[in-house]
């Protein structure tokens, strides 16, 4: 019997663990903290409270039992709880709920703290009637009365927030805006205008309302204006992570290309040093040939000495040919080192272009202007890298040209050597042959001078390439610094938003520790507008109802009004009652 109970207990434990595992995978939670403030027309807060709202979604086929607890600020008064809580403590509200498969549940707590500090934004506003500030919720006016409202929200976070201003239009008023509404909807027969702002620093809106029709009761109660500032902290952190990853990839590519250019520039620097030595050697050889030709042409006595000199010159030219061969090998090695970069140029171009397309896709899918600016900077950097790759390809082709020039130079040295061989063999011949040798030496002298000039031009081209390479490296280093600075700024923003999300998650406890909770913070400001009342008309109406001699007449008048405007009367009866009290007080003061 004991074994049977043990097996049943193990089966129940396994089933419970399976349910918990599936529950953690299928449960989604969205926690919203809303700071609500009611304001009157003359910049005073009439009421405020904080509202927690937790939306739970069970997307799986299993029942999920949950214990949920919300912590409110100390010394707060609880105004509203939905659904009924299991336990309400001093600073906590607890629920024990069961989420059925494929269902959702919303838990709400509304409480009023002894004080409140708005965490994400501040809002300033001004209400003017006929260009004058108001100090009452009821204003004497009529047709043509103008009510102006200016609203400004200021972001307190290092990341953009969404500002939404909404207004329900009503008959009897003409509306003017300095900004066209972003969205207009028809809700239950009423036109509702919405203005949406991606607020990085501040957002402003101004609107005017002009009374066109006072209605049968000669009064207009202007609908309130709602201003809401919100930020989804999880979505904002994910957006920053995407931007940081993209910037890190860009930084890695910049550093890789910069290292390639530095290596190529170092090889070119070694090559130019050897090039200078070759130019100096060829210049000395040309000077010797010129002096030798002059001596041969001046006298025949030194014929034997000349023969020895020619042999020395031949040796010198052979050495020069070896130097040229060495430099040709250096250039060949340099081109071989650049060859992988040039041969893979199209691959690099394709990779950069793919990165550019990915950045453009990110740009098209986000409203984050900071991210958009960073993406545009990254695209500019990619375009400059593509130009740098094209420049390296040109340098590779220029080195090929230089290699061809060195080959031509080697041919000229070979020709000069053959000329020396001819001069040496002709040294023992007649004076005419000596004169021909002298001319040949002069020609060889000129050829070496031309070769020296060609090598100088090649040296200048290589030096120019090094200058361009250094300039490119300097620019790339500047871009790397800018990208690193952007990454650092985004990391700071991410840290601030993450800390804010963790702070609000401390107010929430769910026994399922594996659930991911999306945190949204909102600030809602409800600006109550003044009522425009024709107090003279209401005074006349009250006089008609209070004079005894006109009692029957006034009853008929009131009956006609009620019969014609019964529906409207029901909607404004509250306003009329308050106005009658105001008029009575005015009479007593008189």
Image (cartoon, grey):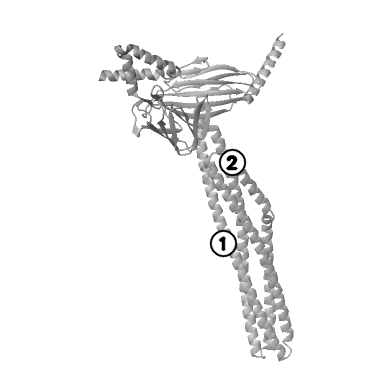
Sequence-wise, which precedes: disc 1 or disc 2? Answer: 2
Residue 143 position, x and y percent, is: 38, 29
Q: Residue furthest left?
A: 590
Specify few, some or many for label 1: CA neighbours under 10 Å numbering under 14, 14-19, or 20 or more: few
Residue drawn at x 62%, y 18% as measured from the top left: 100
Q: Nearer the viewer, residue 588 or 503?
A: 588
Given residues 100 and 571, the one toward you in this image is 571
Distance (Cα) linking label 1 and label 2: 39 Å
Q: Quadrant of the C terminus?
A: top left
Q: Determine the secondary structure under disc 1.
A: helix
- The quadrant of the image that shows the N terminus is top right
Q: Quadrant of residue 103?
A: top right
Q: Residue furthest top?
A: 1
Position in image of residue 130 (x %, y %): 35, 33
Q: Nearer the viewer, residue 449 or 360?
A: 360
Classify 496 as above or below 297. Answer: above
Residue identifier under label 1: 467
> Residue placed at 57% from the left, 60% from the top?
468
Residue at 70%, 10% (x, y): give it.
2
List x then y, in percent, for residue 551: 33, 12
Residue under pointer 2: 364
Q: Does residue 400 lie above or below 497 as drawn?
A: below
Mark 2, other Cα within 10 Å: few <14 / some 14–19 / many ≥20: few
Disc nearest the viewer among 1 and 2: 2
Q: Can you say whether 187 is above or below 479 in the image?
A: above
Query: Can residue 155 be seen?
Result: no
Q: Position of residue 516 (x, y in %)?
A: 58, 28
Task: Kindly state the secondary structure of the residue where label 2 is placed.
Answer: helix
**Number of on-image labels:** 2
As rendered, which of 501 and 146 lies closer to the eye?
146
């Amino acid at each position: 019997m004991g074994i049977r109970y043990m097996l049943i207990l193990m089966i129940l434990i396994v089933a419970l663990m399976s349910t918990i595992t599936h529950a953690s995978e299928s449960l989604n939670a969205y926690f919203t903290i809303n700071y609500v403030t009611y304001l009157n027309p003359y910049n005073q807060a009439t009421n405020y409270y904080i509202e927690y709202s937790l939306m739970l979604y069970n997307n799986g086929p299993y029942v999920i039992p949950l214990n949920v607890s919300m912590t409110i600020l100390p010394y707060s008064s609880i105004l509203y709880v939905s659904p009924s809580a299991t336990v309400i403590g001093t600073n906590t509200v607890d629920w024990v709920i069961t989420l059925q498969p494929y269902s959702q549940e919303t838990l709400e707590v509304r409480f009023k703290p002894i004080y409140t500090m708005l965490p994400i934004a501040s809002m300033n506003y001004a209400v003017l009637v006929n260009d004058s500030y108001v100090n009452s919720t009821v204003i004497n006016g009529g047709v043509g009365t103008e009510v102006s409202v200016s609203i400004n929200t200021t972001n307190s976070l290092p990341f953009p927030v969404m500002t939404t201003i909404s207004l329900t239009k009503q008959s009897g008023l003409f509306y003017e805006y300095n900004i066209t509404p972003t969205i207009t909807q028809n809700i239950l027969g009423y036109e509702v205008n919405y203005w949406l702002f991606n607020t990085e620093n501040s957002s402003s809106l101004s609107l005017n309302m002009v009374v066109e029709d006072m209605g049968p009761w000669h009064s207009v109660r202007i609908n309130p204006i709602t201003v809401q500032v919100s930020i989804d902290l999880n979505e904002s952190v994910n957006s920053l992570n995407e931007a940081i990853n993209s910037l890190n990839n860009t930084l890695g590519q910049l550093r890789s290309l910069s290292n390639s250019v530095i290596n190529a520039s170092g090889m070119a620097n070694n090559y130019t040093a050897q090039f200078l030595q070759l130019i100096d050697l060829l210049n000395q050889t040309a000077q010797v040939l010129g002096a030798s030709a002059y001596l041969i042409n001046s006298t025949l006595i030194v014929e034997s000495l000349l023969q020895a000199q020619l042999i020395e010159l031949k040796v010198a030219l052979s050495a020069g040919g070896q130097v040229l061969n060495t430099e040709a090998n250096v250039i060949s090695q340099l081109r071989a080192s650049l060859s992988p970069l040039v041969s893979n140029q199209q691959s690099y171009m394709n990779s950069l272009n793919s990165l550019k397309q990915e950045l453009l896709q990110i740009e098209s899918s986000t409203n984050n202007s900071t991210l958009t600016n960073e993406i545009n900077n990254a695209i500019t950097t990619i375009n400059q890298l593509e130009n740098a790759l094209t420049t390296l390809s040109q340098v590779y082709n220029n080195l090929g040209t230089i290699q061809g020039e060195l080959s031509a130079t080697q041919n000229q040295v070979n020709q000069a050597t053959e000329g020396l061989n001819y001069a040496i063999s002709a040294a023992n011949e007649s004076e005419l042959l000596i004169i021909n040798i002298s001319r040949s030496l002069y020609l060889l002298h000129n050829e070496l001078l031309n070769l020296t000039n060609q090598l100088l031009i090649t040296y200048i081209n290589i030096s120019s390439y090094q200058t361009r390479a250094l300039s490119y490296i300097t620019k790339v280093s500047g871009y790397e610094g800018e990208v690193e600075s952007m990454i650092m700024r985004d990391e700071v923003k991410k840290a601030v938003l993450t800390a804010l999300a963790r702070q609000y998650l401390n107010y929430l406890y769910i026994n399922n520790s594996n659930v991911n909770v999306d945190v949204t913070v909102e600030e809602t400001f409800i600006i109550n507008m003044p009522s425009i009342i024709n107090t003279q008309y209401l005074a006349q109406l009250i006089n008609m109802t209070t004079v005894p001699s006109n009692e029957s007449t006034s009853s008929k008048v009131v009956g006609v009004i009620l019969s014609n405007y019964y529906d409207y009367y029901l909607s404004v009866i509250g306003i009329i009652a308050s106005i009658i009290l105001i008029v009575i007080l005015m009479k007593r003061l008189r």
